Image (tube, rainbow, N blue to C red):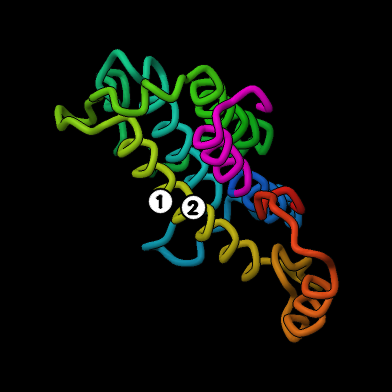
Amino acid sequence: MSQQPAILDSIIKQFMYYRTLGEKAMRQLEPEQWFVSPNEDSNSIAVIVKHLHGNMLSRWTDFLTSDGEKEWRNRDDEFEEDTADPEQVWQRWQQGWDCLIQTLEHMQPEQLEQIIYIRNEGHTALEAINRQLCHYPYHVGQIVYIAKMLKHGSWDSLSIPKRQSNDYNEKKFAAPPVRRHFTEEV
């Protein structure tokens, strides 16, 4: 990633941050808990991962050359539980994120202005990236929230733990100012 231009490097780091948050939340649970739905109108973590997987493969496969809504994608099916195998859930998670990151790692800055299509609607590549940079954290937030509800015992905070903001800020302001992406600490 160090060879990436600054904007693409920042985008990749931001996506990786949310990938890491989702992974840290999922790892705090027993794998069978990934299949628990909070209620009949909610999705389990496994179903959310299935949806992310389908979306990521559709959007990032041939990102610059074909519509982001692939003919082979069945979005409605993504919201149906189809496995009880934690390994399959984890493979979907990894495959989706790997597809996204590999695509971004091969992009050049001049391609950010290229017009691409999602459901036959034109976007610049940068607009499409930003669209997904909003969409995926929305679902990662759902995963984190479900994991926190299902976790029995102590939750390892994924950010600044409750009632520790002052201590955290004291440490930050005690150090000299530094220029870096905030995700480098994660």
Q: Which residue is mark 1?
A: 134
Q: Position of residue 100 (x, y in %)?
A: 50, 28
Question: Would you identify the image quadrant in which residue 173 lies?
Answer: bottom right
Q: Which residue is mark 2?
A: 137
Identify which amino acid the numbered label 1 is placed on.
Answer: Cys
Q: Position of residue 11 (x, y in %)?
A: 52, 39
Q: Position of residue 73 (x, y in %)?
A: 32, 25
**Real-space CA distance between mark 2 and mark 1, rounded to the nearest whole angstrom:** 6 Å
**Majority SS type along the magenta span:** helix
**In the rendered image of this protein, does residue 78 appear above or below residue 1?**
below
Viewer-nearest residue: 80 or 18: 18
Residue shown at 73%/81% (left/top)? 165
Residue shown at 84%/74% (left/top)? 174
What residue span does the magenta drawing correspond to? 1-17
- Tell me whether circle 2 and circle 1 mark residues in contact (CB < 8 Å): yes
For mark 1, give the secondary structure: helix
Residue 16 shown in magenta: yes
Q: Position of residue 18 (x, y in %)?
A: 58, 49
Identify which amino acid the numbered label 2 is placed on.
Answer: Pro
Residue shown at 74%/52% (left/top)? 186
Question: Would you identify the image quadrant in which residue 114 lies?
Answer: top left
With 68 as the anchor, is 45 left or right in this view? right
Residue shown at 28%/21% (left/top)? 70
Viewer-nearest residue: 68 or 70: 68
- Determine crowd level at label 1: few under 14, some 14-19, many 20+ residues with C-alpha closer than 10 A: few
Q: How many marks?
A: 2
Question: Would you identify the image quadrant in which residue 129 lies?
Answer: top left
- Determine crowd level at label 2: few under 14, some 14-19, many 20+ residues with C-alpha closer than 10 A: some
Viewer-nearest residue: 54 or 10: 10
